[in-house]
Amino acid sequence: MLGTAVGRAIAMQAHGNTLCPNMFIGMVGGPGTGKSQTVRAMRSIFIKAHNAVLMPASVTRAALEDYMFDNLASRFAPDGTQILTNECIALTEEMQGILPDQDLSHLTLYNILYDLPSNHKARTRTNGEVKLELPYCSIFTGAQPAYLATVMPENAWGMGFMSRMLMAFDVKGARKSAFVDSVVDHELQAALIHDLRQISQLKGWMKWDQDAMDLYEQWWVKEGGPPVPTQKRLIMGYNARREIHFFKLAMMMSLSRGNDLRVTFDDAVRAITTLLDFEAVMKHIFTEMSTTGATVALQDILDIVRANSAAGKLTDESMIITLLMQRLPQSQVHSTVENLIASKALLVKGGIDARGFRKFDAGVDVPLG
């Protein structure tokens, strides 16, 4: 909310580029981990503190560009001048709403918007060719590991969208009684709204204290930002953007502390600590993805085979292999098919065709997971 509230009005120079504290944040967890409650709580505060029009809960790429074209806001630039910016602000419970399919062009658009270009031309269904002026994009959303495993293609982890996202992981907590009243801290809520309103009026260039710059030089430049995440998907792109995540977090730590627009040593320490806290649990996301993603993939396969069997048709092995290759590592596809046959979830019917593929009928129900 801090980064979104200031928009393009707060910025710093990094590697000769202008960097604003907009972020893509994803809460990753199974059902019942509190993603929706968190988003709703944030949204109720944010819309009272900031005159922003939030993104619809579900958008295609074309709908997103139409929404941004219609969402033109007057904001400040760091030098104090007023600017017009086409905004894209998402506070949505489910990532699948803002990414309803595997359209890589949709991911590419988010990549472009995250980097805050000076303009972006788009051809929309409603408005024809439009030009988005100084587009601004900030995302806070939730996702289940199964969604990331089954919908997010493997190359998306290297092309930029997922590497631009900080992911917070949580498992389902202990059960709580529905009859225990949750006390809303109205005083705290009012204070947050008040502070966000003040912060949204700030403008200027963020400066770094010397000891904060020294810490950055030691941690990132000399030591390479240890400890470095080693998960395959993070190596594909995320690790190259850790420095950018650090800078954005450092600016937000400064904003959360006061209005002096200075990154102090303590702000930099908190930014590093927060970044490492995120990264420490990211590895669990991929563990959950491999487990739940495989389960969902197998269930989808069996559903198709059963539907074909009910219609009196057999299912071609080539179709099953094609679907599994979209969901699982190639090395696991053959063994997965053979395991389904061994468990009698798939029954081989007929011989092998000219291409070397078999035909399958539905077998017994097999518990998955």
Image (cartoon, rainbow, N blue to C red):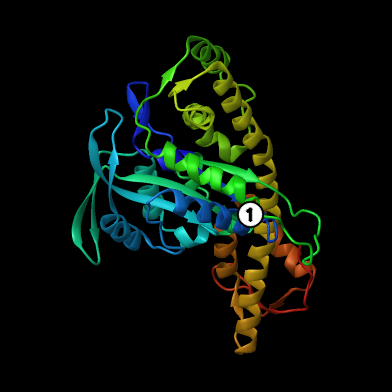
Quadrant including the C terminus: bottom right
Residue 14 at x, y = what percent?
A: 38, 22
Callout count: 1
Left/right placement of residue 259 relative to residue 16 reads: right
Dot 1 amino acid type: Pro
Residue under the point 77% across and 53% down: 173
Q: Residue furthest front?
A: 187
Q: Nearer the viewer, residue 285 or 346?
A: 285
Residue assigned mark 1: 145
Residue under the point 55% across and 14% down: 215
Residue 267 at x, y = what percent?
A: 55, 23
Residue 120 at x, y = what percent?
A: 25, 46
Element under label 1? helix
Q: Nearer the viewer, residue 259 or 53?
A: 259
Residue under the point 63% across and 27% down: 273
Residue 138 at x, y = what percent?
A: 43, 46
Q: Nearer the viewer, residue 111 or 212?
A: 212
Say if residue 234 shows up in the picture.
Answer: yes
Callout 1 crowding tier (Cα within 10 Å): few <14, some 14–19, many ≥20: many
Say if residue 22 shows up in the picture.
Answer: no
Q: Quadrant of residue 276?
A: top right
Residue 146's place in the image compared with 17, above or below, is: below
Residue 74's place in the image compared with 321, above or below, is: above
Residue 161's place in the image compared with 125, above or below, is: above
Residue under the point 46% across and 48% down: 139
Q: Nearer the viewer, residue 128 or 33?
A: 33
